[in-house]
Amino acid sequence: MEIKNKIKQLLKDKKTAAPRILVTGGTGYIGSHTVVELQQAGFEVFIVDNLSNSNIEVLNGIEKITGKMPVFENIDCTDYVTMDRFLSKHEGIQAIIHFAASKAVGESVEKPLLYYRNNVVSLINQLELMKVHKIKGIVFSSSCTVYGQPDVLPVDETAPRKTALSPYGNTKQICEDIITDTIRSSSELKSIILRYFNPIGAHPSAEIGELPNGVPNNLIPFVTQTAAGIREMLSVFGDDYNTPDGTCIRDYINVVDLAKAHVISVQRLLEDKSSENIEIFNLGTGRGLSVKEILTTFEKVNKVKVPHKIVPRREGDIEQVWANPTYANNVLGWEAKETVEDTLKSAWKWQKKLMKKQKNEGSCLS
Ligand code: NAD
Ligand code: WQD
C-alpha cells in the first residue's frame, strides 16, 4: 500500500490525530522536500530552523504544493532552553528528523569550531530533549563522506569509515557515534542514520529547490547558474582521474526520492518495525556518473549549453564513489526511482524559476 494511504488508514483505524514530527532544518534544501512528502503522507509537521542557510519564503512554496502551512519557528537548535520550550508548547511530537547542520566543506576547514559547535551541539540537544519529552525516534542526516574513498565499489554500509578529510566530514562521524552510544545506553530511544550520496534536483513543481548561498561549491547549482549565464564558466576539477573519462564519479540522487526515504524511516521508527534500535542505510541510486556525463546529459535534456573548462583537481576530492543501496531497497522497501534526465530537468526548471523571481524583485545573485 502507498505510504500516504497507509498513514491515512492508520489514522482511521486508531481514530488518532496525525502523528507529529519535528523537522529541524526544515526550510533547507532536503528538509523542505521532506516536509512536503511528510505532509502529503498525512503527518503533522513542525519545523525549527534558524534560517542561517535558508529563506522563510520556502514555507510559501511548501504551502503551494501541499495546501498546508507547517508550524514554523525561527529557533537555533544549539539553544537548548528555547528548543525545550518549543517542545513543551507543541506536545506529542513523536519523532525528529534532524537536518539542521552547517554543510560547506571548505568553510568547515576555515571555521572548524563553528562546525563542531553547530553540528554536534545541535544533535546533543535533540538527543537530550528526546528523553525529556519522551520522543521515541530520530532520523539523522549523515553522508557518504564518512566512507572517504572506499576500497570496494559500490560501497555498502559494512564498509569501514575512513578518516574524515574535513571538520564537516568529521562532524558526521562524531554525530553517528554520539547517536550510537546514546541509543545503546537507553532502550527508550531508536534511530535511523541515513547516509546520503549526492542529492540533486528540485521538486517537479519548481516551488522549492536548492538555494545556494553565494558562489556554489556543489556541481549542479554551478552547472545551472553557468547555463543561466550567472557564472561565466564551469571549472571541471580534473580529467586525469583513474575513471573511464578521467573525471570524478558520484552517485547523484533525486532530492524527492531522498525525501521519501525519510517518510519511510519515520514510519519505521513509529511502528517499531525493526528489532534493532539503530540502523544505518545508504541512500543512493547504485549508479555512478562522471562529471562529464552529468554535463552532457544536462545539456542534452535541457537543450542548453554549459561553457566549461578543465582545471586542476580540487583538493580533497574523492575519485569515485557510488552506493550499493540494496540494504535500503530490501529493508526499507525504498528505491530511487527518478531518472537522472528528469532530475536534471527539474534542476534547470528551478533555476529558471529562481531567475524569473529575482528579475521581478530586481535583485541579482552574488
Ligand atoms: P541546507 O543548508 O539547505 O539545510 C540545513 C538547514 O538547517 C538550513 O535551513 C539552515 O538554516 C538550518 N540550520 C543550520 N544550523 C542550524 C541550527 N543550529 N539551528 C536551526 N537550524 C539550523 O542543507 P541540506 O543540503 O538540506 O542538508 C541537510 C542535512 O543533510 C545536513 O545535515 C547536511 O549535512 C546533510 N547532508 C547534505 C548533503 C548535500 O549534499 N546536500 C549530503 C549529505 C548530507
Ligand atoms: C561533485 C563532483 C567535483 C563543482 C560534497 C561534500 C560531501 C556531500 C556532498 C554533504 C566532484 C565536481 C564540482 C565544480 C566540478 N555533502 N565539481 N566543478 O564533492 O561529491 O561532495 O557534497 O555531506 O560531503 O564534500 O559534491 O557537488 O561538490 O562535486 O568539477 O564547480 O563535481 O570535483 O567530482 P562532492 P560536489
Image (spheres, rainbow, N blue to C red):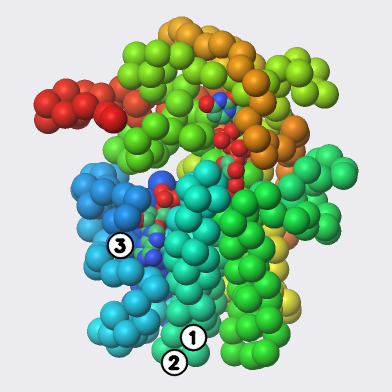
**Residue visible at 87% across and 44% down in the picture:** 151
For residue 181, above or below residue 204: below
Disc with the residue nearer the chain's start (1 vs 3): 3
Q: Disc 1 marks which residue?
A: 128
Q: Nearer the viewer, residue 306 or 303?
A: 306
Q: Nearer the viewer, residue 183 or 243?
A: 243
- Asked whether disc 1 touches disc 2, contact meaning CB atoms under 8 Å apart, the reply is yes
Q: CA distance from mark 1 to mark 3?
A: 20 Å
Mark 2 residue element: helix
Q: Amino acid at mark 2?
A: Val
| Residue where numbered disc 3 is placed | 50
Label 3 residue near ligand 1, CB within 8 Å: yes
The answer to whether residue 286 is left or right of residue 206 is: right
Residue that label 2 marks: 132
Horizontal relation, residue 32 to residue 217: left or right:
left
Amino acid type, callout 1: Glu
Depth-wise, is mark 3 or mark 2 nearer the camera?
3
